[in-house]
Image (cartoon, coloured by chain):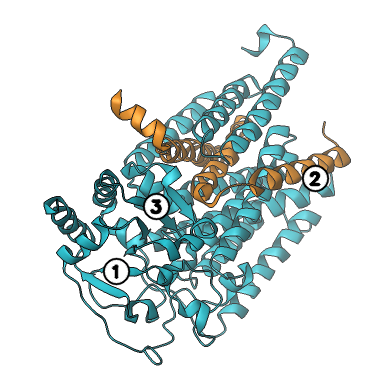
Amino acid sequence: MINGFIALYIFMLAAFTGYEVISRVPVILHTPLMSGSNFVHGIVLVGAMVALGAAHTPLEQAIGFIGVLLAAGNAVGGYVSTERMLEMFKSSKEGKRGKSA
Amino acid sequence: MNTLMSPAVTDNLIQAAYFIAALLFIIGMKRMSSPKGARGGIIWAGIGMLIAGLITFLWPGMHNYILIITAIFVGSVLAWWSGRRVPMTAMPQMVALYNGMGGGAAAAIAALELLKGAAPNLVFAILAVLGGLIGAVSFSGSLIAFGKLQGLIKKSLRFRGQRILNMLVLLAALLQGGLLVTGISDGAGSVTAFFVLALVFGVLMTLPIGGADMPVVISLYNAFTGLAVGFEGFVLQNAAMIIAGTVVGAAGTLLTQLMARAMNRSIGNVLFSNFGETVTGGTAGVAGNLKPIEAADAAVMMAYANKVIVVPGYGMAVAQAQHKVWELCQLLQSRDVKVRFAIHPVAGRMPGHMNVLLAEAGVPYDLIADLDEINAEFASAEVALIIGANDVVNPDARNRQDSPIYGMPILNADKAKNVIVIKRGQGRGFSGIENALFYMDNTRMLYGDGQEAVARLIQSIKTIE
């Protein structure tokens, strides 16, 4: 059980971590990084799974089903789009190596 | 499958997996903040997600396994398919769409928790309601943002008293949320009313915002979804969700600020001023006339230059000219001309979008410079080649206080010895402002479709020996 104050500490430390991680990002990576952080909140999938796993009535099951479906879309879509963008970033050296290979 | 292990072992295993997932997310995001390790970053985070997702099947007392697996399968396949085939120019709206889905998922969790009624204490109830509200707003707002950037919604809905109506809807949603928290009102009807109000607010809030401002809004909703996930993580007592959600909430807020600053706007300004599509300013005060140039002459100018700086804009990507532009640059490089790309923070649809589009064409990232790096170099460049960019090179932003873009940081392309502007016609930029750069003495206009004009340049340079 995560009690109130422990949760508050987690919130605080995680917020500073997020702020620090981003603060030194070059502008060229803003779009991929936004997409990457979009992927990370796809973790909502585990919550949606647990919520659907505990659903009983058809209404609850329907809401839970939509929740898991949307969350899976968030996670997978976020991953695919971020990976596609990032795999294109190459420096001059890497680019030349890529061509000779 | 749960009977194989004692509950305590299962619980420890799940917690350990969530811990590893949270760690991998943070390492992944850290790596994504530098071009070298960026690709590895998303893979690390992806492994974390896979571990967390798989271990959750061991959660004690779960049922509906078939429903869960079906939902994951359908959602994943649809997202994979759409994410693979979307063109790079449409990436911003896809991010909006996937982000909205996450917000919707957080709202669904909130709805299930609220339908159960009787939260263990007030804090749980408040966080469930807040997370649900933010998630639902992010969901419907992101869908509108997607529709606008995709061109499905063409007009920005604006009417008198709009802000007052928005405030009333938000207040009603908060009031209904308050009733749910205190338990004065509960049951499916009240929960539905709460979410309908929240969803309507998301739509109303996003509809009046113009297309140019949409990236800032998408980034804001990204932060919203993170926050909603963090709140629902607390409600579900799920540390991975709390950490990942809060990290994204904070990171997304900072990213939103950075984007807004790059556009010389405040976030409040973006949300409430409806600037995005206004047409202001005019030709008044612009002296001189537009001077056309032939491709052959422009080619000579560039072929014998020491340094050429290319300033690409979204127009280049729309014309699909980035591959041709890179071909042109390689040709110049083979003649020992130094080539660099100057990227304005808001070139493309959002900060960094142009870098993605250039990377797609094969341009190495060390040739690409941002505004602070490159602005001093324009003075030593023989040619600044402007292709598809407009407002971001308008010197009025520096010189004319009455210009609507006054104060916006710009690329000082006007400092180059010669400026060549590739442009389809004589139209204005995204903001509808006349560009003083185009009328300067050292500026020449090369008219034509981006791709075809660059092809003519390439042909002409090849004939020079």
Instruction: Give the residue drawn at x 37%, y 77%.
Output: B437
First in sequence: mark 1 vs mark 3:
3
Q: Amino acid at mark 1?
A: Val
Q: Amino acid at mark 3?
A: Arg
Compare residues B416 and B90 and report the one nearer the observer: B416
Parent chain of label 1: B
Say whether mark 1 and mark 2 are on the same chain.
Answer: no
Q: Disc 1 to disc 3, how far (Cα)?
A: 16 Å
Labels 2 & 3 near each other (Cβ < 8 A): no
Left or right: residue B405 compared with residue B22: left
At mark 2, the secondary structure is: helix
Q: Disc 2 to disc 3, how far (Cα)?
A: 42 Å
Q: Colour of chain A?
A: orange
At mark 3, the secondary structure is: strand
Percent x, y for residue B302?
26, 59
Compare residues B263 and B367 and report the one nearer the observer: B367
Parent chain of label 3: B
Whether residue A57 appears in this view of the structure is no
Parent chain of label 2: A
State the image quarter where residue B295 is shown: bottom left
Residue under pointer 3: B340
Residue under pointer 2: A12
Compare residues B392 and B92 and report the one nearer the observer: B392
User: In the picture, which chain is cyan?
Assistant: B
Disc number lying in front (2 or 3): 3
Compare residues B196 and B59 and report the one nearer the observer: B59
Q: Residues within 10 Å of mark 2 (few under 14, many from 20)?
A: some
Say whether mark 3 and mark 2 are on the same chain.
Answer: no
Instruction: Give the residue drawn at x 49%, y 26%.
Output: B69
Q: Residues within 10 Å of mark 1 (few under 14, many from 20)?
A: many
Residue under pointer 1: B421
